[in-house]
Every structure is written in structure tokens, then in C-alpha cells.
Amino acid sequence: MTTTAAKPTAVTAPVDHAAGKSRVELKNVSRGFGEDWAREEVVRNLTFEIKPGDLTCIVGPSGCGKSTIVNMVAGYDHPDSGEILLNGQKVVGPAKDRMVVFQETALMPWQTTFDNVVFGPRLRHEGSRPEIEKEAHRLLEKVGLGEFKQKYPSQLSGGMQRRAELARALINRPLLLIMDEPFRGLDAMSRPLMQEFFLRLFEENRRTNLFVTSEIEEAIFLADRLVVLSNRPAQVRAVIEIPLPRPRQFHMMSSPEVFEIKRQALEILHDEAMKSFGGAAHFAHRGPAEHEARA
Ligand SMILES: Nc1ncnc2c1ncn2[C@@H]1O[C@H](COP(=O)(O)OP(=O)(O)OP(=O)(O)O)[C@@H](O)[C@H]1O
């Protein structure tokens, strides 16, 4: 199956006053795993801000600690030191004001797309049943799944599943939408369609967004700001503003300023990747025999 829609359907939305007004601050956040001598520091003194109505992209080398950061912002995990604030309030646990869309589908396979979307609000008895269902219908139309409401997740393509997840997150009207490599694993046709679809959705109401990706082009295309991370332990290596106007269009990606931003970010990422390969490169250069002889 292929992704069928690249533009959110025009459906009148109830006013969401919270969208686009939330600020997230990470202040000297550190996190490690393991006991005593075997403890590994994964995030070190991380400080950055996600401004209201902005899409902030975290980019970093593979395994540097991006999901660990997401888990802490979502409240699934806690910093060892430092703090995370949402509109000045310390994040102490998961809540529906911070919704996460992960790269793996989290849709319940035994429920229809519609039932997946209404699941959270129904469980929490938020509003009347007709209200919840009306909003679910609206959101599913919005994400282009109007005709797929009664399908099960396995009957949807990867791109459709991500859109269903978006509807499921958005029904909670989160103050912060967190996307953890949501388009990883999509095929080469679906990924740009999803990027454009997601951009249009974001640009409609500018809900404050934290987006994690390891694709630098995707980050530049989507973001207002890139937070470029170091190798593990993750630290902020650079914060790069993306001066492209909105609505974003693919043709903007061939401008000289995008080329320069890409060069800057790739230089840092390459530098960081080389650090993790440092030991291996040194080993390869001298050869195993020499190492064994010295052992
Ligand atoms: N709960 C945990 N217990 C022990 N180690 C953990 C835990 N969570 C993460 N780690 C370790 O932290 C490191 C960073 O993992 P994380 O998934 O945050 O990185 P990432 O940048 O998201 O990776 P990728 O680019 O592969 O998605 C890894 O070495 C991982 O094993």
C-alpha cells in the first residue's frame, strides 16, 4: 500500500487555545544508566529551549541519547540531575499534555483505527461520547483517513499508520507534540509525502513540537531550529536557526543557505561520529597483530 494523501484535509477545527503557546526548557539535564563502576553517562548537562509555536529538531549521531531525551521530556524517565520545565512547571511523569509519536507503531492491532483514536479520551471519560467521537471523526478526516476508520492497523500502510498515530495524539490536544523518528523505516516514496503532510499540519496551528531525526535534510526542511548533539554523552554542540519562510516548500531545500546549514551540521555530526570510530580507526591503522604483540 502507498501513502495516499500529502495534504491535511480542510476540516474546521474547534479552537485549541493551548496550541502554539507552550515553552519547554531543559536545564542542565543529565542521565546515566548502570550501577556504580559500570555506569554509563548518556546525557550530560543538556540545556536548550523549545520555544512556543516552534518546531525544534534534535539531530545527533546514532545512539547518542536522543530517545533518552525524549523519554525524559515525555516523563517516562527522569533526569539524574537538572530539570525539565513545561510552561514553568517541572515535568514529573507522563501526562496527556505531552504526546509522543514513536517510530514503531503503538496502535493497538486488535482495535480499528477509529477505536484507537478514541481510546484515550474514552478511558479517561473526557467529555461525552458523541463529543469524543465527533472529534475523532474530524481528526481522521484531517489526516486523510476518513475512509479507513474501520480498518485495523495491519490494513494500513506505514504512512497511514503514522497519520493514525498523529490523530490519536492530537485528540488529546497536547501542549507539546513529541515525534521520535516518526518517519524512520518508511519507504522512499512515503517519507517525503509524510514530511510535507506533517509540515502542513504543523503550520496550520504551530503546536509546539519536539522532533527527533537522524536525517539532516528532514530536520532542515521541518524545523525552526536544530539542536545538534554530540556523541554520547549527549551534549549540545550547536543550535542552528533555520531562516526559511513558511509554508515550507521542497524547492527551498536547494537554496545556498540550506546548503550552508547542512554543511555546518554535517561537519559537526561527522566530527562526532569520528570520535566514536576513533578507537576502531586507531586499531585498524596499527592492525590486530601489533595490538596482540603489545598485549
Ligand atoms: N533504560 C536504559 N537502561 C540502560 N541503558 C539505556 C537505557 N535507555 C537507553 N540506554 C542506553 O543509552 C544509550 C543511548 O540510547 P538512545 O536510545 O537514547 O539513543 P538514540 O540516540 O535514540 O539511538 P538511535 O540513534 O539508535 O535511535 C544506549 O547506549 C542505550 O543502550
Image (spheres, rainbow, N blue to C red):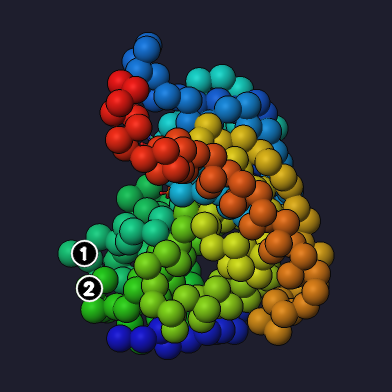
Residue 99 sits above or below residue 69 on the image: below
Q: Earlier in the sequence, mark 1 or mark 2?
A: 1
Of residues 185 and 267, which is closer to you in this image?
267
Q: Residue at x 56, y 36 (%)?
A: 234
Whole-percent x, y for residue 204 in the image:
67, 72
Quarter, ligand 1:
top left
Question: In terms of image quadrants, where is residue 289?
Answer: top left
The 10 Å Cα crowd at callout 1, few under 14, some 14 to 19, many 20 or more, is few
Q: Where 155 falls versus 133 (above or below)? A: below
Query: Which residue occupies 42% across, 88% down?
Result: 4
Residue 108: x and y in percent read 25, 60
Where residue 94 appears, x then y in whole percent?
Answer: 45, 38
- Which image quadrant for residue 101? bottom left
Q: Secondary structure at mark 1?
A: loop
Dot 1 amino acid type: Pro
Note whether 270 is above or below 158 in the view shown.
above
Residue holding disc 2: 154
Q: Are marks 1 and 2 in contact (CB under 8 Å)?
A: yes
Image position of 244 (left or right of 95): right
Is residue 90 in sight in this rendering? no
Element carrying mark 2: helix
Which residue lies under the disc numbered 1?
109
Q: Residue furthest left?
A: 110
Q: Quadrant of the N terminus?
A: bottom left
Whether residue 241 can be seen here: yes
For the residues labelled 1 and 2, the Cα–Cα distance comes to 7 Å
Could you classify mark 2 by the number of other residues whose Cα lies within 10 Å: few (under 14), some (14-19), or many (20 or more)? Answer: some
Residue nearer the viewer, 288 or 260: 288
Q: Residue at left 54%, top 40%?
A: 275
Q: Is residue 37 above or below residue 64?
A: above
